[in-house]
Image: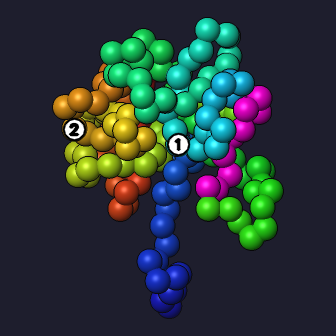
Amino acid sequence: MAYILGTQGFSRLAVGYPVNINDVDVKPAAVAADAPEAGIAPGALLILTDTANVVTSVDPLTTAENLKNKIAGIAMATNVKLDTVFPQSTEGVNWQRGQALGCAVNGEIAVKLTGAAPVPGAPVYYNITAGAFTAAASGNLALPNMVFTGNTQGDITVVDILY
């Protein structure tokens, strides 16, 4: 028996969701009061602030050198946070200032990819201007405690956080 699941078939990766829910460590954190007004999207790279357990997203105007020792983890998606706009907003369901969120600090999580599909075990970099993960080192923020798993679907790939 065959199934037809939409025009693109069945996509098993969703940005911000863990690949194996039993093998991911999540640390609770709060979104900083000075975080972007649009909020923090699931799957975004999180940056530590000066306040304990408070995170923000990467500012596109900062340099990789300023961020290299401030990586908190990756923002987790959730199934219980609903869009407050009907019909659904184009921005999706982002974590707003002051809200609690889950910060993945260990395990495999799906993230947005820019550039070519990475090979398994390749080092992970973050393209600050594109706001996405990449395998290209030139001008990007190195994430030494992360590797690509090689599992890629279109512009979504899986990163293994080795913290």
**Cα distance in 3D space between marks 2 and 1:** 19 Å
Q: Nearer the viewer, residue 7 or 139?
A: 139
Q: Is residue 31 magenta?
A: no
Q: Residue beneath label 2, please?
A: 136
Q: Nearer the viewer, residue 36 or 149?
A: 36
Which stretch did the figure color magenta?
Answer: 91-99
Q: From the viewer's perspective, is residue 22 above or below residue 104? A: below
x then y, percent, for residue 22 = 60, 39
Residue 21 falls left or right of residue 110: right
SS at badge 2: loop
Q: Residue at x 36, y 49 (%)?
A: 113
Amino acid under disc 2: Ala
Q: Quadrant of residue 123?
A: top left
Most common secondary structure along the magenta stretch: loop
Q: Nearer the viewer, residue 51 or 27?
A: 51
Q: Assess whether mark 1 and mark 2 are in contact (beta carbons under 8 angstroms).
A: no
Instruction: Using a 10 Å C-alpha cutoff, classify the residue at mark 1 as few (fewer than 14 neighbours), some (14 to 19) or many (20 or more).
Output: many
Instruction: Using a 10 Å C-alpha cutoff, classify the residue at mark 2 as few (fewer than 14 neighbours), some (14 to 19) or many (20 or more).
Output: some
